[in-house]
Image (cartoon, rainbow, N blue to C red):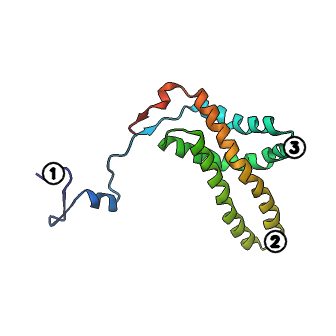
Amino acid sequence: MTEITERKINNHFSYDFVAKKVFLIKTSRKPGYLIDPVAFFIALVAGPLVVTAVSFWILLIPVFALVFGGPIYLVMGTPLLLIHLRRNQASVRDLMSLGFLAALALFPILGVATQIVGEQILFNGGFFLLAFGLLFGPLWPGAFGAIYLKLRRDFYAVARPI
């Protein structure tokens, strides 16, 4: 009988733990975190609303940011936040970094879309909106993180095997 870390292949070869990673054979994974669904969805909606309510007096820019960036935040931010919170302990700083990187990732997408469509006005308008996205990109997930950490129940704060 072979050991747990070795297995015969075609009755000739055996592989070890390193080969398991190369061939994507399932091995044990590090523990993950359960996501509190109620706290997640309340924080997902309340995060941008709180940032807008606190800072709307700045030339009404946050109100327009909520209108233009809100759908992008929900479509792009929801899966990113779910993946991040499932694999990592929640922290406001990490979520703000994730939001900033997500906003930066939209710039190459805008460039490719401009080349495909061939309209320079798309790039100019999109660049203007994404410049504000670099400001609100970290603020909204930061507010999300603060709200989520306040509302999350203790059961969901412990790492568990996935």
Corner quadrant of residue 150: top right
Q: Quadrant of the C terminus?
A: top left
Q: Amino acid at mark 2?
A: Gln
Which of pointers 2 and 3 indicates the residue nearer the eye? 3
User: Residue 114 vs residue 32: left or right?
Assistant: right
Quick one: label 2 or label 3, which is nearer the N terminus? 3
Q: Is residue 11 visible?
A: yes
Label 1, residues with CA under 10 Å away: few <14, some 14-19, many ≥20: few
Give percent across and percent down for residue 80: 58, 48
* Rendered position, 95 above or below 104: above
* Rendered position, 83 above or below 152: below
Q: Which residue is mark 1?
A: 3
Q: What whole-number distance in Å separates the C-alpha atoms at marks 3 and 1? A: 66 Å
Q: Is residue 23 visible?
A: no
* Rendered position, 4 above or below 111: above
Give percent across and percent down for residue 63: 83, 43
**Identity of the residue drawn at 58% across and 31% down:** 149
- In the picture, the disc for residue 60 is 3
**Identity of the residue drawn at 49% across and 31% down:** 157
Q: Amino acid at mark 3?
A: Leu
Q: Residue furthest right?
A: 59
Q: Which residue is mark 2?
A: 120
Corner quadrant of residue 50: top right
Q: Does the residue at mark 3 contact the one at mark 1 (Cβ under 8 Å)?
A: no
Quick one: label 3 or label 1, which is nearer the N terminus? 1
Label 3, residues with CA under 10 Å away: few <14, some 14-19, many ≥20: few
What is the total number of numbered labels drawn onto the structure image? 3
